Image (cartoon, rainbow, N blue to C red):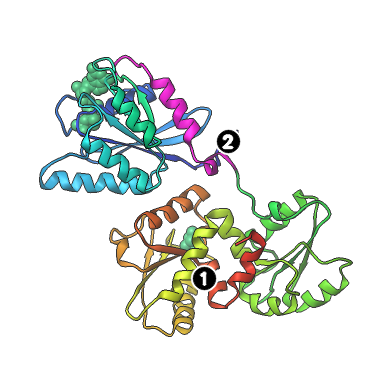
């Protein structure tokens, strides 16, 4: 197993009723008394992050949460905060205590499975109570991993850790391919890089360098041209290239010069795939066609500075969308690590290139939109969409 890329933390939400032993279980798993435990229900109020090295997997963050059966006005707020953690979770442990697997647990399991979060049912306090046949049968039927544990004696805790490692999403364990799965040894790949006023002086930008480096790692041949030279370059190659990768800004011109039979894509699409879930981002772009007058579109930037092109999100995308759809759309801008609380208000979220985020974080954001019923795409995919070239640039990936 490869080490998870640095800084990528698996988010594991621990949920359940009050007093089920959620905090105790985190203490047992981490081997530290870091979470406050008591027999008073409602001890944990706000979600608390507990970083931990789950070896050999890598860094994870356990989120200790308030009981989902908390009552009163404050209780409702706590439940809301717990649900917010669930929206971001990669894995979930649902803890049940003396009461076992009851109605509230079943409801919660259904909700978590509906959100497509892999879940383990930890039947805690196994020193006090043996699991029932019907509980085991229920989990078998619903495809949920059932694990009796005791935070008090430590029974089952190692097995629980192993289950977390086994269930960690694949993308957490593997470094994704940028272009290497489209190219084999000896292939030619033509990269189109416009050198205009926006290009930095004296160098290529990092995404271009990364693509070229991966082409070389594949023992393939990388050819770099400006958009004016693409036709000449193609004519002088002895055989057609395996792939043409172009800057999105000149995709229209390049698409005209590259024969239809030659696979072609953009740097932005390669990075959308590398950083996120390309099929979901492409499906989100299809939602642009369904936008109607008055719809809200969220332009989401993952950090507050955008060194590449400040006006892409704020000026160009709104203008292109308005021209393409012919609709009166309402654009709102949001920068930061979270989405707005009222994400459901938006018909579509258009995300930045996420250069400051790692893949897990971006996938989490895509999933959060999906879970909350909001379509999501990103700048790079949206640009090809409004230029009418999305099918062409997605074709190399079988989409
Ligand atoms: N016998 C036994 N007692 C346990 C076990 N796990 C937790 N407890 C006890 O159960 C009580 C509740 O434990 P907590 O870990 O605070 O439960 P919680 O789910 O975090 O509770 P809230 O934060 O109030 O929602 C405490 O008195 C613990 O000592 C266990 O495996 N066996
Ligand atoms: S993460 Fe990168 S692309 Fe997104 S807003 Fe920040 S600088 Fe811009
Ligand atoms: Mg607690």
Q: CA distance from mark 2 to mark 1?
A: 33 Å
Q: Is residue 34 visible?
A: no
Q: Nearer the viewer, residue 116 or 344?
A: 116
Q: Which residue is mark 2?
A: 3
Q: Relative to 137, is 356 above or below?
A: below
Task: Write the residue at 39% across / 54% down.
Answer: 368
Q: Nearer the viewer, residue 103 or 266?
A: 103
Secondary structure, mark 1, is: helix
Residue 320 vs residue 46: left or right? Answer: right
| Residue depth check, mark 2 versus mark 1: number of the one nearer the observer | 1
Would you identify the image quadrant in which residue 158 lies? top left
Q: Relative to 33, is 178 above or below?
A: below
Q: Which residue is mark 1?
A: 382
Task: Write the residue at 39% across / 83% down.
Answer: 327
Q: Which residues are magenta?
A: 152-174
Which quarter shows the C terminus? Answer: bottom right
Image location (x, y in percent) of residue 345:
30, 66
Image location (x, y in percent) of residue 202:
70, 66
Task: Write the residue at 34% across / 43% down.
Answer: 112
Q: Is residue 156 magenta?
A: yes
Q: Is residue 145 visible?
A: yes
Residue 269 vs residue 14: left or right? Answer: right
């Amino acid at each position: 197993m490869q080490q998870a890329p640095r800084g990528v933390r698996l988010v594991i939400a621990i949920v359940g009723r009050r007093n089920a032993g959620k905090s105790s279980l985190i203490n047992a798993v981490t081997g530290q008394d870091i979470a406050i435990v008591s027999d008073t229900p409602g001890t944990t109020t706000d979600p608390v992050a507990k970083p931990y090295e789950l070896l050999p997997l890598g860094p994870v963050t356990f989120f200790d949460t308030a009981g989902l059966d908390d009552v009163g006005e404050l209780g409702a707020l706590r439940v809301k905060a717990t649900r917010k953690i669930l929206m971001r979770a990669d894995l979930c442990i649902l803890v049940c205590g003396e009461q076992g697997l009851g109605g509230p647990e079943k409801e919660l399991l259904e909700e978590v499975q509906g959100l497509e979060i892999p879940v383990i049912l930890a039947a805690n306090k196994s020193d006090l109570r043996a699991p029932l046949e019907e509980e085991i049968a229920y989990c078998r039927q619903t495809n949920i991993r059932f694990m009796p544990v005791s935070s008090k004696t430590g029974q089952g805790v190692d097995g629980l850790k192993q289950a977390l490692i086994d269930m960690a999403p694949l993308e957490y364990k593997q470094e994704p391919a940028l272009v290497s799965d489209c190219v084999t040894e000896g292939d030619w790949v033509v990269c189109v890089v416009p050198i205009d006023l926006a290009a930095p002086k004296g160098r290529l930008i990092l995404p271009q360098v990364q693509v070229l480096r991966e082409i070389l790692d594949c023992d393939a041949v990388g050819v770099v041209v400006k958009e004016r030279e693409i036709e000449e370059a193609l004519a002088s190659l002895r055989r057609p290239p395996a792939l043409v990768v172009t800057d999105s800004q000149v995709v229209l011109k390049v698409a005209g010069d590259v024969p239809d039979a030659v696979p072609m894509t953009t740097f932005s699409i390669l990075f959308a795939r590398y950083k996120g879930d390309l099929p979901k981002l492409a499906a989100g772009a299809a939602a642009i066609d369904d936008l109607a007058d008055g719809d809200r579109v969220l332009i989401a930037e993952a950090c507050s500075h955008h060194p590449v092109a400040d006006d892409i999100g704020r000026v160009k995308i709104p203008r292109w969308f308005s021209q393409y759809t012919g609709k009166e759309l309402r654009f709102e801008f949001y920068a930061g690590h979270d989405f707005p609380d009222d994400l459901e208000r938006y018909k579509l979220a258009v995300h930045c290139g996420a250069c400051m985020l790692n893949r897990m974080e971006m996938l989490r954001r895509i999933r959060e939109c999906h879970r909350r019923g909001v379509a999501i795409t990103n700048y790079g995919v949206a640009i090809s969409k409004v230029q009418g070239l999305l099918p062409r640039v997605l074709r190399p990936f079988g989409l």
